[in-house]
Image: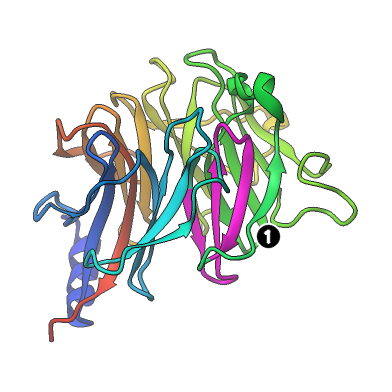
Amino acid sequence: MTELQATRSKAVTGTHSVERLFLLDLSGGRVLTMSPDGSNKKAIVSNGHLPDGVAIDAEAGHIYWTNMGVPNLDDGSIERVDVDGTNRTTIIPRGITFTPKQLHIEKRSGKLYWCDREGMRVMRSNLDGTEVEILVKSGDGEDDRRDATKWCVGITVDPDRRQIYWTQKGPDNAGQGRIFRAGIDIPKGETAASRTDIEVCFADLPEPIDLELDRESRVLYWTDRGNPPNGNTVNRASIDMPVSNGRLPEIVLGDLMEGIGLALDVPGNRMFVSDFGGSVYSARLDGTEKRMLLYAQGNLTGIAYAIIPSKEK
């Protein structure tokens, strides 16, 4: 543990709070929680329907996660549970979102954002699941649904600049993955399918998956499932440097077994990564001090980090 992390851990303890990781086991349909060092792992939810994306509302004490469902059945959903595993409820029922993937909570506006892969959409709702909106629609119909370049997967939000970022991963190892950016709201007079404010931030990526944004440094991080050397990695790049300037993403972590989940602890200078091979890693934000926390834990998808208020006094 670095000096910064030790000081911060002491501060967290002093406020009767606890640091926790939350991760999803797709193969077991479970929501798991553990300490940031990999200890004290336990399942708090079971019987999920292919869970993929997870986000924490620490202030309210809620865990939100997406269930992909069976991709060709349009039976995806979003659920919520208290951090202790009680009060499980469905926020977005089946039939509204096709294959929900990464999930993001934007507390300032009280919104949930997520990507819908086979639905080819970027979506949002209120935290209670009301007022569902389609913000981006990259395709329509069965022919488009078979085109993986139109699949929306990872998402993050920049509330300061009022922008959303999302990935469209492309076919396996095809080098057609892209990261897009657009306004947080659809321009007046336009639709989710016709909006003109969408720009490509990065193109020709192996298979970009989940996104996280360091808002302080304005650096975007993402996992990539594609083959090495550019795939099976965690990448980062400034969001203020246009692609036209020739800036390439920086690979900060490699040797993953199909990296998917990504969580940042910016004050603690840490990232946490989960992969489909069942491993969880921690590292500094620059990729150094990589450490394996768990391995052979099934098919892991989403991961989230949060400081949770503790009931202990």
**Residue 290 at least partly seen:** no
Q: Residue at x 43, y 39 (%)?
A: 68
Q: Residue at x 13, y 82 (%)?
A: 312
- Quick one: label 1, few (<14), some, or many (20+) residues within 10 Å? few
Q: Position of residue 146 (x, y in %)?
A: 60, 19
Q: Position of residue 257 (x, y in %)?
A: 28, 24
Residue 135 belongs to the span the image colors magenta: no
Q: Quadrant of the C terminus?
A: bottom left
Looking at the image, residue 23 sits to the left or right of residue 197; the answer is left
Q: Position of residue 252 (x, y in %)?
A: 38, 34
Q: Which residue is mark 1?
A: 162
The one nearer the camera, 237 or 293, is 293
Secondary structure found at label 1: loop
Q: Residue at x 81, y 43 (%)?
A: 195
Residue 108 belongs to the span the image colors magenta: yes
Q: Most extreme residue toward the left, as rendered?
A: 40
Residue type pointed to by label 1: Arg
**Up-down relation of residue 150 to residue 228 (above or below):** below
Range of residues picked out in magenta: 103-126
Q: Position of residue 292 (x, y in %)?
A: 17, 37
Looking at the image, residue 211 sits to the left or right of residue 311; the answer is right
The one nearer the camera, 170 or 241, is 170
Q: Most extreme residue toward the right, as rendered?
A: 189
Q: Quadrant of the N terminus?
A: bottom left
Q: Residue at x 55, y 70 (%)?
A: 110
What type of secondary structure mainly makes up the magenta span? strand
Q: Most extreme residue toward the bottom, as rendered?
A: 313
What scheme was used to colour the molecule? Answer: rainbow
**Hey, which quadrant is residue 283 in on the image?**
top left
